[in-house]
């Protein structure tokens, strides 16, 4: 597969390491009520969609960016590649 | 034997005769021959035996679809089983052997299977060999296995090299027949970067095998001139002898180039083959079509072959499988074989056309509305039985029979991404359906079977591809060529009570398909699996569609309703070595060497693999006969005076920025925010699931600057994890990190004289006395007169110890300088074994303990998990299962009888309890012989272990039938109070 | 009920094979069943077989969207073994192994269970210690295991690369009773056995929805109409996410991944049993037909496409060439991909769901084939008795919430590392 890195252009997916669902960005609040349950859902439960999937890839043999790749799990077509940092900020993560 | 079946003409270099042997007999052919064409020219039709019934077989094709003529090529370590004689290029001295027979090729004892074939019908083995039960493994299966397989491996290492390469192009053209050449010319003239790949050694595809003209030139000459033009263009790369094996995601294709298979041995420095990974923007699949046979009784006799192959042998290779031949066809194309062979002077005894209304044929007896019902001649065809339109049967002399059942487009690569072909009733064949993104199909592969159609569709396909890339297309100037329509009346098999062969290699007959139907194996996949049809080395290229058609007839459904079959990569079989390339044997993975490697090698160190690293394991001295002697000496010398160890392999991560402390505070379960500048702290890192991920020390060099270390094994993963936290979880923390593992050479200097040694090399302006530089201190210093260095007072061994780091290029110099400085203390360098012994003596957890299932609580570090802050893993480590009664705790063990050794992987059983799983109390993770204590010691996980110190348990090793009594003790065997490391 | 035997084969051979009948019926679906199993793969068919044979439930249908045995049971590397490390797993897989050992006589079908040994190679002292821990754990569970030193390995497999390897062989853990089974025959044997006991095997019947009222499942919508049931068991491996979503369960501790597997051209016998490489990921055996059947890591990204990519093909062959260089000139014949239901700790789930009457069997990762008999038996047990079988008590959904993961590889909540 080829991942079109937003900074570096098209790169072979072999340069990357895959983690999984981009929802792993949405780490819950440790101090909130029922944190163990929310952390359990966050870490262990997956929607595992047959279709568009936002997922995290790390450019290990490259610039060490974490990327959020939107890829179709039925066809492997990649429709969007973003810096995970930007996605995280857009989802409200900060410090 | 002379070349008695050699014809005139052809594309052979007759000035270059080549000698070769087959089954020990010597023959001669010419440059340009394949092994099969040369054997046919020499009058040899029998080339192999089938898999199951050991039926005598000859080639049915002239290409890579060949099921029958497969041989063991070459000798010794280069022996190559299951090689298709039809594509093996002849070279001087080639030697080949037929395979899969007991006795000789002509008199194969296992041909008895053929006599017993009615007992070996499809799937028979599923129904028998079950009683008595023990007989399966003792008798039946060994018998079956002995008969299994085709060719044999040499069992030697391959002496040849294999390379891998990467290519990029705008357009990949797969196949250099008329459509591929037209596509390549169109694209090349338009300025696109083109790769043209063809599996043959002479590009041109069917143009080399037909007598058509293209414009004024013969097909072969036109192909030559097209190749000449393409070769002259800088934007074109032509890969001959290169088969595109698979279509993968995003326009990536795999291709195998047979660089040296056409010569006896690869030229010096050249690989045998290259596996190319081709990155294409677009691809034109111009893979042509494969002719299919018509099944009839004994249609597998040597001499019965595909009609197109027969005329390819005649036209291209000037060879005929017999002096008198016949042709059996259900379509117009088959008639071409008869006319071409006639033109070559071969006697045609009959042309049998299953169509009553087929076109007339001049020059030989033409039997319309007739079918071949039987073939005679056990080791080679002598005659055929023909059922005439009148119903009468006639026997006709023929040494060879060309059969044409029509042509199947080579849709294989269109299926590699699970695209389904679709049925085309006009062609009576499947044509490409859903295509991989970026692929266009041209020519016969797309059902355009005439030459003019192939040329035009090749040009159109290239134009479509280029337009998609935004390139301007220059129209290709294409020659006039034949444009005969496809006229075929499907005939899949001739009904008869005898056996008619579909998959010739795996011996699947029409009857087997019928039996599969009778027993309910009616889907295509069931059919293939039950009968093994299409599972042979040719992957059913000449049999799958016919088998499907027979099944369709049984079920009373149409072929597309019955199903379709898709193809998987590779298109043709690829040597396993080619996929591995150079990453094999000692070069399987890269080797990382430590900065002191050269010095250690000079000392005669024994090295050990640690991840990718080679580390010195111990340093044997003269007179030492066992590794234990060396290791014991290294431990005692270190604990007695001073020892040095290269610890560069530990991961080092530089963490900088105003939020660096806060960042580390969240990465580690224990607090880091208040670590003082110039101080080092041990940190335990959890995964989000609360399991220990890694541990190490972190030094604060400045308010906003930390250096953190990881274990050797986890260096890469921990760095990745920290980047995840930094970029994805807390993107606005102002912190930067970088791995500096390769940037710094780091050595541990341990032992009571460690400081004295270091004081000799640390520059005098730096005070490293115990007061100025206490335990868990750190600082940036210079050594050896101004060399930048970092010093950390940390101890893995439990001794007074430091780790000193210098830029990697000075690592070799530093170890030599320290050894020189340490001479008065009898300093030595110790290896990983001594390192391991000392860490076990000190009770430090390492890889064996951090095994991915252990929590802080298991490690005895539950108190480190700070509940007053957020850190990765702290929340989920609160789950009840991770805090349950009787959890494993890491404790120490020593044998009750001090002379007894311990072994890693022993399990613990309470005394008096039986040794079974129910009573399993835990297991030993690490053991060592402690030279300091004079007996074996171990670390291990024990249920509720923290509360069980002083207990005596059985340490059992049922694998070896041994056990020993052990006492549960503190994991800190040496200096439990930690006085030495503070001294 | 037709019984297969050598005598029957001979009789039919002499009478033109006219007497063979379909191995299973092709029934129309009934309106209602006591139990419906979704998924005509190995696990689903085995479940139906044991429901009928052991638990006396014959009013059972297996619904298969395509043709039976077309999923992972039809495309795997055919290995059976019970050499697991953890308490949660070992008794289950040993139960499976014992069922394998009597399977053929039990269902009257020769699945060619071939116990020629599974040998795991180790390359470091630490790996050997880990193998000793595992082997001793197996022994304590009453399972066969032998720890071999280098010479022991050499005796068994002299062709391995002992001298020029990047990661030299120090020894190995052998399970002599491990081996291989003819995978397709497992599906067919269970199907035939279940059919003979009254189970309806309904092919080309895809589930398109569930009928659920008041938290209780009442049946399934299918491409062949509505079919009612008291209980429904879902055993669809890589399609677990898709099917459970139709029941409104949108999140599972499972990801779908592709595992590629490989077979070479047929070769005269060279391998004694199953061999696995410990420094790269590579495992191989030789089939009764002579092909080397091998595999390695999953591709590593979520997918429902039954195909993979080149990097893993190369990686697997690199492993193979490193450990047994003599296979280099053998040709790789076919690559195929299957969708694995990779769970969050690498271990399976056999459990009830939050919907009354809906039961789940999945998360087999790429170890599902060897588990087929025990999975079927234990799932049948759960469906029939509403209680987990004693060897499958750990395979619950809530183990993640409770912190009772069964993580053989110690890789944590990242499915592609298991």
Image (cartoon, coloured by chain):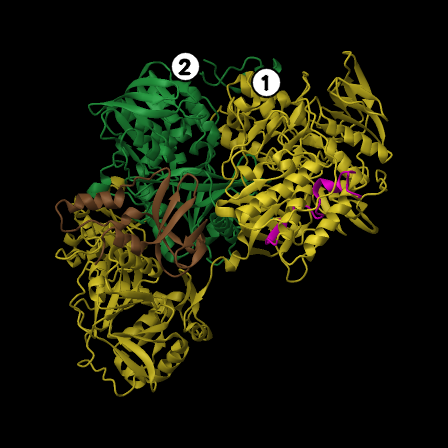
Chain colours: A brown, B yellow, C green
What residue appears at the point 69 percent right and 55 percent down from the top-left corner? B231
Q: Quadrant of residue C254?
A: top left
Q: Position of residue B467 (x, y in %)?
A: 55, 46
Left or right: B328, with C149 as reference point: right
The residues colored magenta run B191-216
Q: x, y percentage for residue B141?
A: 53, 32
Within 10 angstroms of label 2, few (less than 14), some, or many (20 or more) residues?
few
Q: Magenta stretch containing residue B205, yes or no? A: yes
Rendering coords of residue B304 (x, y %)? 74, 29
Tell which of B192 and B981 is nearer to you: B192
Q: Is residue B124 left or right of residue B650?
A: right
**Badges 1 and 2, same chain:** no
The secondary structure that most of the magenta stretch takes on is loop
Seen in the picture, residue C120 relative to B56 is either above or below; the reply is below
- Which of these two is toward me, B485 or C371? B485
Q: Is residue B953 above or below residue C357?
A: below
Q: Is residue C225 above or below residue C125?
A: above
Which label number is shown at residue B553?
Answer: 1
Q: Position of residue B834 (x, y in %)?
A: 33, 67
Which residue carries the number 2 mark?
C28
Q: What chain letter is assigned to the residue under label 1?
A: B
Question: Which SS class for mark 2?
Answer: loop
Q: Is any atom of residue C385 visible in this view?
A: yes
């Amino acid at each position: 597969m080829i991942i079109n890195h937003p900074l570096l252009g098209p790169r072979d997916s072999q340069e990357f390491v895959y983690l999984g669902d981009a929802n792993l960005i949405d780490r819950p609040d440790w101090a909130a009520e029922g944190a163990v349950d929310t952390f359990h859902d966050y870490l262990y439960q997956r929607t595992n969609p047959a279709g568009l999937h936002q997922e995290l890839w790390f450019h290990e043999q490259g610039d060490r960016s974490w990327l959020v790749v939107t890829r179709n799990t039925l066809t492997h077509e990649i429709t969007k590649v973003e810096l995970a940092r930007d996605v995280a900020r857009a989802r409200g993560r900060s410090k | 034997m002379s070349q008695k079946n050699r014809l005139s003409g052809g594309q052979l270099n007759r000035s270059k005769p080549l000698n070769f042997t087959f089954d020990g007999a010597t023959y001669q052919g010419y440059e340009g021959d394949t092994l099969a064409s040369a054997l046919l020219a020499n009058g040899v039709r029998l080339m192999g035996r089938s898999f199951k019934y050991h039926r005598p077989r000859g080639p049915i094709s002239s290409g890579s679809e060949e099921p029958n003529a497969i041989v063991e090529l070459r000798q010794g370590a280069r022996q190559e089983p299951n090689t298709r004689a039809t594509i093996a290029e002849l070279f001087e001295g080639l030697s080949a052997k037929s395979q899969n027979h007991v006795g000789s090729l002509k008199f194969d004892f296992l041909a008895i299977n053929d006599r017993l074939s009615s007992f070996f019908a499809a799937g028979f083995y599923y129904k028998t060999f079950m009683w008595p039960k023990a007989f399966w493994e003792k008798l039946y299966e060994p018998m079956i296995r002995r008969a299994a397989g085709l060719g044999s491996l040499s069992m030697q290492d391959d002496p040849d090299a294999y390379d891998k390469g990467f290519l990029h192009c705008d357009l990949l053209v797969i196949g250099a027949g008329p459509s591929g050449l037209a596509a390549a010319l169109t694209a090349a003239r338009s300025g696109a970067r083109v790769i043209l790949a063809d599996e043959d050694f002479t590009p041109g595809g069917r143009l080399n095998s037909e007598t058509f003209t293209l414009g004024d030139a013969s097909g072969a000459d036109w192909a030559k001139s097209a190749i000449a033009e393409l070769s002259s263009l800088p934007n074109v790369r032509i890969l001959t002898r290169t088969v595109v094996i698979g279509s993968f995601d995003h326009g990536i294709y795999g291709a195998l180039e047979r660089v040296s298979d056409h010569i006896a041995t690869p030229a010096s420095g050249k690989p045998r083959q290259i596996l190319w990974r081709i990155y294409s923007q677009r691809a034109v699949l111009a893979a042509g079509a494969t002719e299919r046979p018509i099944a009839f009784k004994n249609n597998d006799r040597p001499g019965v072959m595909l009609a197109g192959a027969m005329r390819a042998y005649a036209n291209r290779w000037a060879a005929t499988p017999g002096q008198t031949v016949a042709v059996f066809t259900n379509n117009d194309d088959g008639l071409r074989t008869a006319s071409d062979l006639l033109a070559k002077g071969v006697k045609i005894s009959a042309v049998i056309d299953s169509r009553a209304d087929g076109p007339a044929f001049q020059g030989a007896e033409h039997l319309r509305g007739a079918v071949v019902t039987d073939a005679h001649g056990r080791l080679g065809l002598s005659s055929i039985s023909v059922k005439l339109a009148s119903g009468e049967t006639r026997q006709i002399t023929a040494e060879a029979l060309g059969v044409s059942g029509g042509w199947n487009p080579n849709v294989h690569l269109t299926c590699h991404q699970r695209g389904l072909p679709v049925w085309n009733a006009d062609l009576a064949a499947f044509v490409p359906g859903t295509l991989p993104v970026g692929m266009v199909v041209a020519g016969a592969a797309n059902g355009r079977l005439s030459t003019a159609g192939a040329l035009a569709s090749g040009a159109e396909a290239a134009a479509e591809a280029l337009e998609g890339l935004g390139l301007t297309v220059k129209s290709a100037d294409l020659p006039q060529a034949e444009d005969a329509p496809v006229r075929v009346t499907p005939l899949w098999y001739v009904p008869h009570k005898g056996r008619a062969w579909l998959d010739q290699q795996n011996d699947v007959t029409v009857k087997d398909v019928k039996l599969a139907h009778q027993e309910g194996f009616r889907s295509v996949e069931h059919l293939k699996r039950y009968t093994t049809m299409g599972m042979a080395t040719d992957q059913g290229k000449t049999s799958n569609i016919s088998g499907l058609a027979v099944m369709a007839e049984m079920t009373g459904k149409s072929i597309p309703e019955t199903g379709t079959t898709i193809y998987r990569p590779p298109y043709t079989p690829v040597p396993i070595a080619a996929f591995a390339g150079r990453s094999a044997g000692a070069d399987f993975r890269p080797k990382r060497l430590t900065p002191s490697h050269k010095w250690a090698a000079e000392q005669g160190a024994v090295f050990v693999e640690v991840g990718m690293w080679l580390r010195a394991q111990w340093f044997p001295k003269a007179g030492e006969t066992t590794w234990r002697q060396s290791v014991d000496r290294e431990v005692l010398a270190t604990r007695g005076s001073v020892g040095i160890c290269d610890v560069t392999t530990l991961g080092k991560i530089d963490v900088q920025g105003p939020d660096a402390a806060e960042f580390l505070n969240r990465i580690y379960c224990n607090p880091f925010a208040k670590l003082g500048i110039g101080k080092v702290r041990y940190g335990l890192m959890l995964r989000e699931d609360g399991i220990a991920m890694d541990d190490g020390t972190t030094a604060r060099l400045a308010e906003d600057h930390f250096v953190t270390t990881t274990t050797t094994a986890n260096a890469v993963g921990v760095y990745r994890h920290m980047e995840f936290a930094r970029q994805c979880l807390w993107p606005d923390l102002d912190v930067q990190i970088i791995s500096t593992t390769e940037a710094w050479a780091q050595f541990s200097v341990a032992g009571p004289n460690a400081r004295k040694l270091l004081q000799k090399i640390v520059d005098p302006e730096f005070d490293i006395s115990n007061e100025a530089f206490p335990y868990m201190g750190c600082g940036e210093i210079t050594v050896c007169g101004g060399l930048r260095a970092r010093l950390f007072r940390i101890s893995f061994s439990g001794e007074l110890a430091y780790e000193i780091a210098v830029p990697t290029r000075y690592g070799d110099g530093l170890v030599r300088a320290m050894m020189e400085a340490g001479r008065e203390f009898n300093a030595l360098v110790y290896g990983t074994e001594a390192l391991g012994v000392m860490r076990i003596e000190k009770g430090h957890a390492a890889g064996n303990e951090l095994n991915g299932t252990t929590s802080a609580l298991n490690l005895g570090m539950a108190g480190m998990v700070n509940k007053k802050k957020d850190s990765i893993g702290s929340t989920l480590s609160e789950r009840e299962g991770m805090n349950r009664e009787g959890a494993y705790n890491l404790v120490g063990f020593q044998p009750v009888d001090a002379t007894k050794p311990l072994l890693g992987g022993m399990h613990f059983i309470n005394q008096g309890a039986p040794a079974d799983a129910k009573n399993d109390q835990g297991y030993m993770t690490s053991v060592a012989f402690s030279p300091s204590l004079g007996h074996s010691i171990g670390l291990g996980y024990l249920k509720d272990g923290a509360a069980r110190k002083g207990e005596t348990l059985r340490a059992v090793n049922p694998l070896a039938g041994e056990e020993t009594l052990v006492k549960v003790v503190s994991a800190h065997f040496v200096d439990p109070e930690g006085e030495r490391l503070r001294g | 009920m037709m019984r297969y035997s050598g005598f029957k084969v001979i009789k039919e051979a002499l009478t033109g094979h006219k007497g063979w009948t379909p191995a299973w019926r092709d029934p129309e679906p009934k309106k209602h069943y006591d139990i419906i199993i979704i998924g005509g793969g190995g696990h689903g068919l085995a479940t139906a077989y044991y429901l009928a044979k052991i638990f006396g439930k014959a009013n059972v249908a297996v619904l298969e969207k395509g043709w039976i045995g077309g999923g992972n049971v039809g495309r795997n590397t055919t290995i059976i073994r019970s050499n697991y490390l953890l308490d949660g797993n070992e008794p289950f897989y040993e139960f499976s192994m014992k069922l394998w050992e009597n399977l053929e006589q039990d269902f009257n079908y020769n699945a060619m269970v071939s116990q020629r040994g599974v040998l795991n190679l180790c390359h470091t002292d630490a790996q050997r210690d880990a193998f000793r821990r595992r082997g001793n754990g197996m022994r304590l569970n009453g399972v066969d295991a032998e720890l071999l030193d280098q010479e022991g390995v050499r005796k068994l497999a002299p062709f391995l690369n002992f001298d020029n390897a990047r990661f030299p062989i120090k020894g190995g853990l052998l399970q002599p009773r491990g081996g291989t089974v003819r995978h397709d025959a497992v599906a067919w044997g269970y199907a035939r056995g279940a059919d003979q006991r009254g189970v309806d095997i309904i092919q080309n019947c895809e589930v398109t929805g569930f009928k659920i009222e008041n938290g209780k499942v009442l049946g399934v919508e299918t491409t062949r109409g509505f079919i009612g049931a008291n209980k429904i068991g879902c055993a669809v491996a890589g399609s677990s996410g898709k099917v459970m979503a139709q029941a409104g369960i949108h999140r599972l501790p499972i990801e779908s991944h592709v595992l590629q597997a490989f077979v070479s051209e047929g070769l005269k016998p060279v391998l004694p049993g199953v061999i696995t490489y410990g420094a790269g990921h590579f495992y191989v055996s030789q089939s009764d037909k002579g092909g080397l059947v091998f595999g390695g890591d999953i591709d590593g990204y979520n997918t429902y496409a039954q195909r993979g990519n080149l990097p893993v093909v190369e990686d697997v062959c690199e492993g193979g060439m490193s450990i047994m260089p003599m296979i280099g000139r053998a040709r790789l014949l076919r690559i195929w991909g299957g969708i694995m239901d990779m769970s969050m700790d690498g271990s399976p789930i056999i459990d009830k769901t939050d919907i009354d009457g809906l039961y789940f069997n999945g998360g087999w990762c790429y170890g599902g084939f060897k588990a087929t008999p025990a999975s079927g038996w234990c799932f049948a047990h759960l469906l029939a008795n509403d209680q987990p079988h004693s060897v499958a008590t750990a395979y619950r959904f809530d183990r993640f919430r409770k912190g009772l993961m069964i993580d053989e590889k110690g890789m944590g909540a990242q499915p592609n590392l298991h």
